[in-house]
Image (cartoon, rainbow, N blue to C red):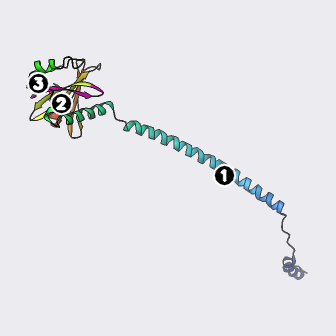
Amino acid sequence: MAREDSAAEPMVARDATYHRAPDALRRRVHASLAKAAGEERAPVSRRTLGFVAAFAAAALVTWNVSLMRLEPSRDDLVARDVVNAHVRSLMGERHLNDVDSSDMHTVKPWFSGKLDFAPPVPDRAQAGFTLSGGRLDYVNGRAVAALIWRGRQHVVNEFVWPTSAPDSTPATLARQGYAVIHWTRGGMEHWAVSDMSPALLAPLSD
């Protein structure tokens, strides 16, 4: 009997009739499977979108911070202006002085009526600088006084204009191969530039 059952199994497997599921049923099964798969993926998609949004926000903040850091400061802009004015003045002797004199009592009155302020013209012989003259120039968006000094065979342009800022100690910069020193004193802003070393230029502000 046992042999008959075992012999019948291959015959059943061989002779069994298979029926294809109706198309409508197959579509419903596929739709259910797709929906289930979509629900499983949805949290991942939301997390991915959240990550992308957070990354974009962080990138925007970083970009804005970088732009702020790249934006030149006011001192950088003025330093560029005074260096450019210094270079222009050396393009020929006629560009250097509007009034040629080593006498402060000649140079200072020359500015009267040409500017809306009277620039100080001190005696800097003890610091190693001799007055050469003066001229009008345009720096930092306004007309300024330019005092020309000579020291150790170097030309120094000192630009002076009024300011409401308090007195400040001299600060030294280096721009385009030139030494620049600036300070505020007595309601006047001073910017001096030369191709001499910063250490040699520093006494000008004493």
The answer to whether the residues at label 3 and label 2 have Cβ atoms under 8 Å apart is no
Q: Nearer the viewer, mark 3 or mark 1?
A: 3
Q: Which residue: 24% across, 38% down? A: 175
State the image coordinates of residue 167 (x, y, percent, origin top left): 25, 20
Q: Which residue: 85% across, 78% down? A: 9
- Quote the CA–CA distance across marks 3 and 2: 14 Å
Q: Earlier in the sequence, mark 3 or mark 1?
A: 1
Q: Nearer the viewer, residue 175 or 146?
A: 146
Residue type at numbered disc 2: Asn
Mark 2, residue position:
157
Which residues lie in the magenta part?
Answer: 127-142
Q: Nearer the viewer, mark 1 or mark 2?
A: 2
- Quote the CA–CA distance across marks 1 and 2: 71 Å
Left or right position of 153 against 169: left
Mark 3 nearby-residue class (10 Å; few <14, some 14–19, many ≥20): some
Q: Main secondary structure of the magenta part?
A: strand
State the image coordinates of residue 134 (x, y, percent, origin top left): 15, 26
Mark 1, residue position:
41
Q: Nearer the viewer, residue 49 or 126?
A: 126
Mark 3, residue position:
124
Asked if residue 111 is positioned above or below residue 83 in the image, the reply reads above
| Tag 1 secondary structure | helix
Mark 1 nearby-residue class (10 Å; few <14, some 14–19, many ≥20): few
Query: Can the viewer see residue 170?
Result: no
- Quote the CA–CA distance across marks 3 and 1: 80 Å
Residue type at numbered disc 3: Arg
- State the image quarter where residue 116 is shown: top left
